[in-house]
Amino acid sequence: MERLVDKVVALVACLPALAATARGTVGAAVVVALLAAVTSASLVEVLRGSVRLVPPLLCCALVCVLPNSAALLGVAACDLCFVASLEGGRARLAPLAAPVALALGWCVGAEGPVVLLAVLGAVVGAWLGLRAGVFECRDRDALRTRDELRAAELSLAEKNRELLDAQDYEVRLATLSERARIARDIHDNVGHLLTRAVVQAEAYRVMHSGEPAEKDLAAVALTVREALDEVRASVHDLRDDACDLSVQVRAVVERACEGTELAPTVRVEAGEAPAAVASCLTAVAREAVSNVLRHSNARHVSVELVEHPGLWRLTVTDDGTTAAGAPGSGPGMGLASMEERVRALGGTFRVGSGEGGGWTVFASVPRSGGDRRRT
């Protein structure tokens, strides 16, 4: 809307020169010049880039054919100054076409009063075009700054989310490690003590068979055995709570690649899993990454663990040219161990070359395999 107002003002500033040219009559030259000015002003708003300089430059060139069309150079000067201020570079020389056209018009045959009034209209149009160009540049810079600030805000928000996720991951890993330690200590210390107490109580009961103390010793043995069962149940619960599959796989891959040139990418879309499944897939991921480090010249390894409604799927892919178990080298103990673990849970295990080279280890464990606990 502001551009339309500026062009109307520029056209009004050209009216005195146009009136002096017409001298009370409207000739074909005046009509052609007016149509050329209106068409040029319209095309400038439609076109984009430096091409917008073409219509006003053609209006300036029209002066060579119709000298009296110099009366409407104010509209062309407005567009030339506007586009030149936006495009910059060589386009800044375009506004010089207006005074050159005025000079040509005066030399070819335009009357002196017409040229003077045309100069006045051209000055007004040039000032309006420069002002509009400055405002447009400021608006463009403001929009660019706003977009940059918005991008920085989104980037900062993303980094904050990553930091929060990393913090939650560390807290979860520490919690699971502590639970695993407590379960291990209870199993190794309290469990063994209670087992010894059960054995001693049974031994004393056998020694005092037939005596009144036999029933008391049997009751003590039963109580200690119940306590042992409760401790074992608690240990299993702590161990199962400590089997967060995503945390364990991430920790295994990060520890395996720490201090090496191998860059890991870990994508995990799985939560907690039964202890048997977590132990199996964690061991497969550890062995697969270790094989990449020992037997491959890969620079990058990708570990993907996805939990589907019916199974867990683990894929380990590297970008190397050689790998353990490659065709011709024969399967190693590591591959055999991984396959045995997966097969024991009723899963599927495959190895082979990837589509883009490298080596791929694939393992899937059905949800029914999680019910098979290791003894």
Image (tube, grey):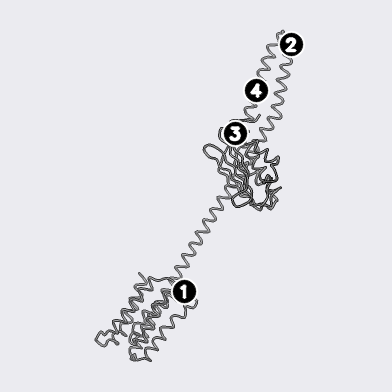
**Can see residue 137?**
yes
Q: Which residue is mark 4?
A: 227
Residue type, numbered disc 1 = Glu
Q: As drawn, is 332 to the left or to the right of 32?
A: right
The residues tagged by marks 2 and 1 sit, at their Cα atoms, a distance apart of 107 Å
Which badge, 2 or 1, is on the more N-terminal residue? Answer: 1
Q: Which residue is mark 2?
A: 208
Look at discs 2 and 1 and give the one toward the viewer: 1
Q: Which residue is mark 3?
A: 346
Residue type, numbered disc 4 = Ala
The residues tagged by marks 1 and 3 sit, at their Cα atoms, a distance apart of 68 Å
Is 265 or 225 nearer to us in this picture? Answer: 265
Residue 19 horizontal/vertical position (percent): 28, 85
Residue type, numbered disc 3 = Gly
The residues tagged by marks 2 and 4 sit, at their Cα atoms, a distance apart of 23 Å
Which numbered marker is on residue 87?
Answer: 1
